[in-house]
């Protein structure tokens, strides 16, 4: 098992990073969150890894934190969730925020991830919610600057903005300073006006 890799960033693509370690270039598939954390080409980086073995291929996934890798592995344990969907889910938020969303039962957030519908989102929450409780994550533990996860109409407004083409991060940024008690239509209108 490859635990982590440290080397020079040789290339960055939309879905991955090539890390040059002692003259060997490793292609690591990464989430959007990790891609944002990785240094630019020529810089040094350390990525925690997960090797996914399939009959026809070996896939190496990279994560900027051990917490993100652990969450990836938890997602893989959910029935019908493969590495692509797990990576897509990790791309929508930081691991701590995803754990809070799981604990809060935020179906709207997970169903806004491309490839995950409402039923799959409900299954993810059902299968992982108890594990989040075991990790000491509570519904009311959102950190400073985090968008409300299960307050009022914010999840529905977020889902509407995602349907309009915004990323989950963009939708959260637009909604972060708005009153969670407003009707969904007002939240969406005010977010679009920004």
Image: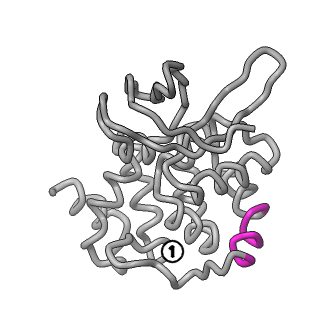
Residue at point 52% right, 85% down?
Answer: 140
**81 to 189, vertically: above or below:** above
Does the stretch in magenta take in 181? no
Q: Specify few, some or many for label 1: CA neighbours under 10 Å numbering under 14, 14-19, or 20 or more.
A: many
Residue at point 73% right, 33% down?
Answer: 52
Q: Quadrant of the N terminus?
A: top right
Quarter assignment of residue 116: top right
Residue at point 59% right, 60% down?
Answer: 67
103 vs 92, left or right, is right
Q: In the rendered structure, which segment of residues is drawn in magenta?
A: 127-134
Instruction: Report the front residue among 78 and 42.
Output: 42
**In x, y percent, where is residue 8?**
40, 31
Does the stretch in magenta take in 129? yes
For the stretch drawn in magenta, the main secondary structure is helix
Reading the image, the residue beneath label 1 is 150
Q: Farthest residue to the top: give it.
A: 56
**In x, y percent, where is residue 2?**
69, 38
**In x, y percent, where is residue 106?**
57, 66
């Amino acid at each position: 098992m490859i635990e982590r890799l440290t080397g020079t960033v040789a290339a960055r693509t939309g879905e991955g990073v090539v890390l040059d370690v002692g003259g060997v270039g490793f292609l690591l598939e990464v989430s959007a969150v990790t891609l944002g954390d990785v240094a630019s080409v020529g810089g040094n980086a350390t990525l925690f890894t997960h090797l996914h073995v399939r009959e026809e291929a070996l896939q190496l996934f990279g994560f900027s934190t051990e917490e993100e890798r652990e969450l990836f592995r938890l997602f893989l344990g959910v029935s019908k969730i493969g590495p692509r969907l797990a990576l897509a889910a990790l791309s929508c938020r930081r691991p701590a925020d995803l754990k809070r969303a799981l604990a809060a039962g935020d179906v709207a957030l997970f169903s806004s991830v491309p490839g995950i519908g409402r039923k799959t989102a409900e299954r993810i929450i059902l299968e992982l919610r108890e594990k989040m409780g075991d990790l000491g994550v509570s519904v009311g533990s959102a950190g400073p600057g985090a968008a409300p996860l299960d307050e009022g109409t914010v999840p529905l407004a977020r889902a509407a903005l995602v349907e309009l083409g915004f990323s989950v991060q963009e939708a959260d940024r637009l909604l972060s300073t708005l009153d969670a008690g407003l009707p969904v239509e007002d939240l969406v209108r005010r977010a679009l006006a920004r």
